[in-house]
Amino acid sequence: MSFVEYSELIQDEDVVIIFMGHDSMMPIKVQSGAQTQTRYGVIRHSSDLIGQRFGSKVTCSKGGWVYVLHPTPELWTINLPHRTQILYMTDIANITLMLELKPGSVVCESGTGSGSLSHSILRTIAPTGHLHTVEFHSQRAEKAMLEFKEHKVSHLVTVRNQDVCKDGFGITGVADAVFLDIPSPWEAISHAKKTLKYKGGRLCSFSPCIEQVQRTCEALLDHGFEEICTLEVLLRVHDVRTVTLALPDFGPEECYADSTQTASDLSQEDVNTSVICKTATPPREMAGHTGYLTFASKPRDQKCE
Ligand SMILES: C[S@@+](CC[C@H](N)C(=O)[O-])C[C@H]1O[C@@H](n2cnc3c(N)ncnc32)[C@H](O)[C@@H]1O
């Protein structure tokens, strides 16, 4: 099992996602001889998991069942142990696209936090790219390293335990893209510029407050970045309901083909059919502000040509 490649069968030491419902999942590490308690009973790793296909339905000791899923960055993001605030799929999808990430890209990121974004970056840049991720909190840096190892992606990532605003990313002129999720991104812009390739590259900074965005944009302009743009990405979840619609009987087609009568002209007596159907209603107000994404491009460095 690896977070960047699909495997058919569950093996000892794999991470699997126990799916009990769309809002009830848990990641576990498979260990020969171990057991996991769920509300449907016990799962015995040796007999119930090892050797089974990812995606199988597993019956627990109380007779209830769960699905055992292959881990993906999306499932990890909604199930990972939080050490910090994390980025979610709506922002991650835009970051990956707008940073123009692809297999082989070299990316610098800070801070690593809980590694939510890192896992999606790793899947996108595999098998030949590399992620350099900087985290100044030593326990978070260590935990991230451990998880990358367990998820079989450690060959694609270097974790540095340092302050990105003081010490930068630890590499110069190699990155295709830089991502910042720190409280004072404007202090890291000069380092971001240094770490991006001389031929240029893309940058993104995530900040919850517009005042942080303003300072970051000023720093980006001061350092010669171009195409600066900030966006907020909100997910609009429609509420799906079953409703009964009363339909008027319009009679045979030829009776109303030339008519100017509309549905609102009809009286209650005209209504003699009802249908049950699904409707989807968008929310009236958009909740769920996470932050602003500021993107910019570093132009080709003329001095290095
Ligand atoms: C909000 S979290 C990042 C979450 C991450 N993007 C994710 O999706 O899981 C911010 C992280 O940046 C780290 N951090 C803050 N300032 C930093 C700095 N100057 N250098 C390195 N890391 C920093 C914090 O310790 C924290 O772990």
Image (cartoon, rainbow, N blue to C red):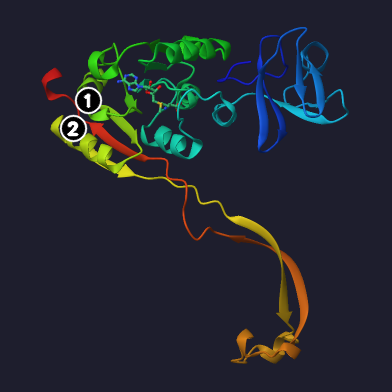
**Image quarter hosting the N terminus:** top right
Disc 2 secondary structure class: helix
Write down the residue under mark 1. Answer: 187
* Left or right, residue 180 beside residue 261: left
| Picture mark count | 2
Q: Is residue 255 above or below residue 107?
A: below
CB atoms of marks 2 and 1 within 8 Å:
yes
Quick one: label 1, few (<14), some, or many (20+) residues within 10 Å? some
What kind of residue is marked 2? Ala
Q: Residue at x 57, y 11 (%)?
A: 150
Looking at the rendering, the quadrant in which ligand 1 lies is: top left
Q: Nearer the viewer, residue 162 or 280?
A: 162
Q: Residue 221 falls in which quadrant of the image?
A: top left
Which residue ends up furthest to the right in the rendered image?
63
The answer to whether the residue bearing label 1 lies less than 8 angstroms from the nearest atom of ligand 1 is yes
Q: Residue at x 15, y 29 (%)?
A: 223
Residue 197, position as x, y percentages in the image: 25, 20
Disc 1 secondary structure class: helix
Q: Which mark is residue 219?
A: 2
CA distance for labels 2 and 1 = 8 Å
Which comes sooner in the sequence, label 2 or label 1? 1
Q: Nearer the viewer, residue 191 or 123?
A: 191
Q: Residue 178 falls in which quadrant of the image?
A: top left
Q: Nearer the viewer, residue 301 or 22?
A: 22
Q: Residue 202 falls in which quadrant of the image?
A: top left
